[in-house]
Image: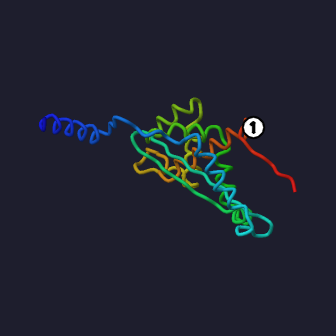
């Protein structure tokens, strides 16, 4: 009897150590977006207002790419965004406005790649164009080059980059749930 219990405990410990849980808790995913919206709505009150503006914008993400976990969450107050200097953001958005650069970034999602591999992923782009794109992406801080000729996404940019891509796809498709309340 005791040996059976010990054997079962050892089996459970082995499964846990291997990351295999026998019963996963139910995720609350369907409620999470609504909870985020309620949290953000709470920031539209007078306590958060400045110059007739209030509220907050939050973005977050969790991604597993090539056995690496990337987690990110950021929140900005609407008055701060409205008063921000957009010079750096404009440079970054301009840099991302190229289908070739987006293709390069997408090719680097899973793993670092050599310039030769990146050249192949772009197809008929010249080597000069490839290096022009890579220089611009490095200048914005999206890419790093840890070894000569090998490029990778800067780890801190993975989730924000995916968020930018998701927002651009949503805006382009006109999707999303929004409400506008008149004065």
Quarter of the rendering occupied by the C terminus: bottom right
Quarter of the rendering occupied by the N terminus: top left
Q: Is residue 73 visible?
A: yes
Disc count in the image?
A: 1
Q: Nearer the viewer, residue 119 or 5?
A: 5
Left/right of residue 93 with respect to residue 109 in the rendered view: right
Left/right of residue 110 with respect to residue 33 in the rendered view: left
Q: Could you tell me which residue is drawn at 66 percent across and 44 percent down?
A: 167
What coloring was used for the rendering?
rainbow
Q: Is residue 113 visible?
A: no
Q: Residue 58 placed where, x, y %?
A: 62, 54
Q: Nearer the viewer, residue 95 or 165?
A: 165
Q: Could you tell me which residue is drawn at 58 percent across and 41 percent down?
A: 128
Badge 1 element: loop
Q: Could you tell me which residue is drawn at 47 percent across and 36 percent down?
A: 116
- Which residue appears farthest toward the front when viewing the image? 1
Q: Residue 20 placed where, x, y %?
A: 32, 36
Q: Nearer the viewer, residue 32 or 81?
A: 32
Image quarter of residue 127: top right
Q: Give the answer, above or below, for where 162 lies relative to 23.
A: below
Q: Residue 129 placed where, x, y %?
A: 60, 41
Q: Give the answer, above or below, for where 49 lies relative to 94.
A: below
Q: Could you tell me which residue is drawn at 52 percent across and 47 percent down?
A: 158
Image quarter of residue 55: bottom right
Crowd tier of the residue under label 1, counting other residues whose Cα lies within 10 Å: few below 14, some 14–19, many 20 or above? few
Q: Residue 70 placed where, x, y %?
A: 46, 48
Circle 1 residue: 174
């Amino acid at each position: 009897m005791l040996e059976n219990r010990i054997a079962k405990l050892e089996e459970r410990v082995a499964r846990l150590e291997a990351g295999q849980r026998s019963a996963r808790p139910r995720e609350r995913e369907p409620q999470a977006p609504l909870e985020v919206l309620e949290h953000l709505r709470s920031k539209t009150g007078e306590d958060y207002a400045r110059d007739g503006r209030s509220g907050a914008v939050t973005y977050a993400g969790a991604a597993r790419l090539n056995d690496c976990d990337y987690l990110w969450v950021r929140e900005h107050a609407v008055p701060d965004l409205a008063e921000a200097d957009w010079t750096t953001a404009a440079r970054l958005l301009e840099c991302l406005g190229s289908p070739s650069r987006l293709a390069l970034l997408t090719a680097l999602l899973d793993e670092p790649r050599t310039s030769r591999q990146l050249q192949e992923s772009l197809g008929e782009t010249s080597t000069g164009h490839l290096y022009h794109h890579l220089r611009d992406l490095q200048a914005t801080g999206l890419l790093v080059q840890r070894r000569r000729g090998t490029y990778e996404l800067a780890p801190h940019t993975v989730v924000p980059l995916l968020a930018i891509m998701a927002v651009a796809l949503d805006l382009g498709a006109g999707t999303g749930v929004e409400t506008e309340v008149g004065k």
